[in-house]
Amino acid sequence: MKMKQPFHHGSLKQALLDASGILLDQHGPDGVTIRAIARQVGVSHAAPVNHYKDRETLLTALATILFKDLLASVQEKLSNKNLPASTRVSVFAIVLFEYAMAYPNRYRLLWHTGLVNHNDPQLLDVMDQFYDACCAEIAGAGMCPERDVETVAIALWSMVHGYTDLRLTGMFEEKNDNVSGCPRLEAMLDMFLNQSHAKSPQE
Amino acid sequence: MKMKQPFHHGSLKQALLDASGILLDQHGPDGVTIRAIARQVGVSHAAPVNHYKDRETLLTALATILFKDLLASVQEKLSNKNLPASTRVSVFAIVLFEYAMAYPNRYRLLWHTGLVNHNDPQLLDVMDQFYDACCAEIAGAGMCPERDVETVAIALWSMVHGYTDLRLTGMFEEKNDNVSGCPRLEAMLDMFLNQSHAKSPQE
DNA sequence: ATGTCAATATTGACAGCGTCAACTTAATAG
DNA sequence: CTATTAAGTTGACGCTGTCAATATTGACAT
């Protein structure tokens, strides 16, 4: 005997996001199609349009959630007030990189121009929070008094994002990566931080 | 009176690549579809399959050509033997960034995982050449004697690629960009190069 | 309780896509 | 001159996003 599904799902909007996340992890950004999401949830192929007017809108909402998660991870790590100033800055880099390695498809979606609308106000808001937090940490650590804080922050984010992105495409494969981290990234950060402190390394 | 087209195109393979480049510039990576290319060239929608077995193969060939162009630009700039050592290194960054600003869709295609096969031997070969040239320049300039050349090269490429990619998604919009360059990128490079020299800035 | 309305879901259609199989054309080798 | 084969065409299939038309339901006013 088959239970008849109720005509109205009740919380389809949330269910669509949940299913999208699962499909994203399993099949990558291209696997997150409107119809596949609808199949996953068990509704008709055109049901999602009632909650998101098109695919880009849905994926932008998903990306916003994922970026919030990423930001929350950073903030959680930074809530430890006993961290030395230099490690506080590198938390941004390490959390971001490890997030991308753990969930490559999620990180890919975040920056996938054709699928996500990077002018969306809500997404922009989260990104601004991320950037502002990064700037605050750099400024608060008393780094680079003679340099523009924004330049340092942009350089740091660029370096980490670039390295992460290149790694996700298969470049710079590292045998030394392990559970305790990525030695190459740490070497890059060490270089970056020593520079920003304007401290000569051979003292 | 209408000229009847010859049944065989003669040089369809090259024509497909040419048309793909035009479509890429005009409509972005998503606009470079097999059928649109065929229309542009004036052949049937299934003709391209005789020369490239699928869309990914065609776009990978296109990406390989574009990357060769980028490498050639760098090499052409570096053929000037009178450049100071520090500017020689920053040539990599500036050429890459300006290429991306001039041809955003081309740069996007280069790193578009779903469309391009980054395990393709020919594409890998060009990328290796680019990376090796970057390493050679860093090593040859006598930079960073106390640091791993590979780490410096990867850090540089990561920073520039990351900044470029983030700029292409609309982040860090700069009003001061102009024909003479990008002041922010130059500030980042200045920071990076001073660090690699391990020179204290307040001397 | 009853009727109405708006929200929500379904169905069916359309055009565009990549890809494949079957077929046609033409050029070339023997 | 013929056989072979490369190259191009046609038509089909299943997939996609999106839209219009329809059906169902819950909620709310009467």
Image: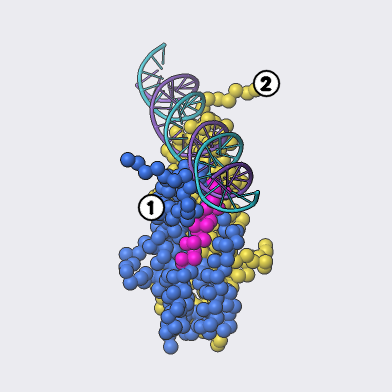
Chain colours: A blue, B yellow, C purple, D cyan
| Callout 2 crowding tier (Cα within 10 Å): few <14, some 14–19, many ≥20 | few
Give me the residue at 39% from left, 70% from top: A184
Disc 2, disc 1: CB below 8 Å? Answer: no
Q: Amino acid at mark 1?
A: Gln
Work out which quarter of the rendered image holds the C terminus of chain B and state it: bottom right
The percent coordinates of residue B10 (x first, y second) are 52, 31
The stretch in magenta equals A49-70
The percent coordinates of residue A97 (x first, y second) are 42, 67
Disc 2 and disc 1: Cα gap in Å?
56 Å
Labels 2 and 1 in the same subunit? no
Q: Which residue is mark 1?
A: A26
How many numbered marks, from 0 up?
A: 2
Work out which quarter of the rendered image holds the N terminus of chain B and state it: top right
The percent coordinates of residue A36 (x first, y second) are 44, 45
Chain where mark 2 sits:
B
Q: In this image, A178 relative to A13: left or right?
A: left
Give me the residue at 49% from left, 65% from top: A68
Q: Amino acid at mark 2?
A: Met
Q: Is residue B114 above or below residue B175?
A: above
Indicate whether residue A67 is drawn in magenta: yes
Q: Is residue B143 above or below residue C18?
A: below
Q: Is residue B147 above or below residue D15?
A: below
Indicate whether residue A116 is drawn in magenta: no
Chain where mark 1 sits:
A
Label placed on residue B1: 2
Name the dominant secondary structure of the magenta segment.
Answer: helix
| Callout 1 crowding tier (Cα within 10 Å): few <14, some 14–19, many ≥20 | few
